[in-house]
Amino acid sequence: MYGERPGHTLQTTALVNEAFLRLVNSQRVDWQNRAHFFAISAQLMRRILVDYARTRGYQKRGGGTPKITLDEALVGPQEKGRDLVALDDALNELAAVDRRKNKVVELRFFGGLSVEETAEVLRVSPETVMRDWRLAKAWLAREMSKSGTDRNDA
């Protein structure tokens, strides 16, 4: 939500509230631990943001939003618009290739977790998270540029 215009209809508190309501209403989840909670929360945030972007009339690849680099998108864009739909599509492709790298991006970008928290959730070392983070950003940048979005490499 960082960098969105003032008066944006999906505010941070609304996003957190929506995620909370979905978590509370999800009685089928057998919570294993704190890490499991963070992983599910990050997935929910991703779904909420992407669904919101799709319902706001964004086209599959761009929809008139300003183009930004993948690095800006993953670290917190300074531009007002984000191409979450294209990022989501690329993340789905990444999940088919490397599930852990997909989870690293999901936890860090959508869940807001630090490297150390992500390592704890995934039960890997912080160095592995950083390596996966770098490789995932490069992979996503390449995939998104192949799709014709004319983005710069991360």
Image: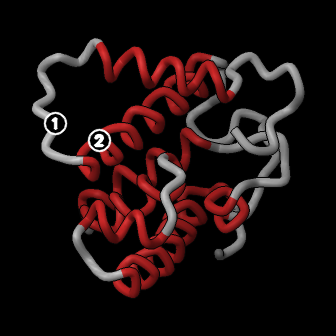
The label number, if any, that marks residue 31 in the structure image: 1
> How many dots with numbers?
2
Residue 116, horizontal then vertical, whole percent: 43, 72
Left or right for 5, reference 27: right
Whether residues under marks 1 and 2 lie with C-beta atoms below 8 angstroms apart, the answer is: yes
Q: Which residue is drawn at 52% across and 77% down?
A: 138
Asked whether, in this view, residue 69 is left or right of residue 138, the answer is: right
Question: Residue at horizontal 31%, vertical 17%?
Answer: 24
Picture coordinates of residue 37, whole percent (x, y): 29, 41
> Residue 149 sits in which quadrant?
bottom right
Image quarter where the N terminus lies is top right
Residue depicted at x 13% and y 44%: 32
> Which amino acid does the dot numbered 1 rest on?
Trp
Give residue 75's quadrant in the image.
bottom right
Along the line of sight, the residue nearer the viewer: 64 or 128: 128
Up the image or down, 80 lies above or below 154; here it is: above
Q: Which mark is residue 7?
A: none
From the viewer's perspective, tell me whether residue 110 is left or right of residue 14.
Answer: left
Residue 121: x and y, percent?
29, 60
Kind of residue indicated by mark 2: Phe
Name which of mark 1 and mark 2 comes first in the sequence. Answer: 1
Q: Is mark 2 on a helix, strand or loop?
A: helix
- Residue lying at the far right in this picture: please name it: 6
Q: How far is the residue under mark 1 from the one under mark 2?
A: 7 Å
| Quadrant in the picture for the C terminus | bottom right
Secondary structure type for disc 1: loop
User: How far across and down, in percent of the image, does residue 20 sit?
Assistant: 43, 22
Q: Which residue in the structure is indicated by mark 2?
A: 37
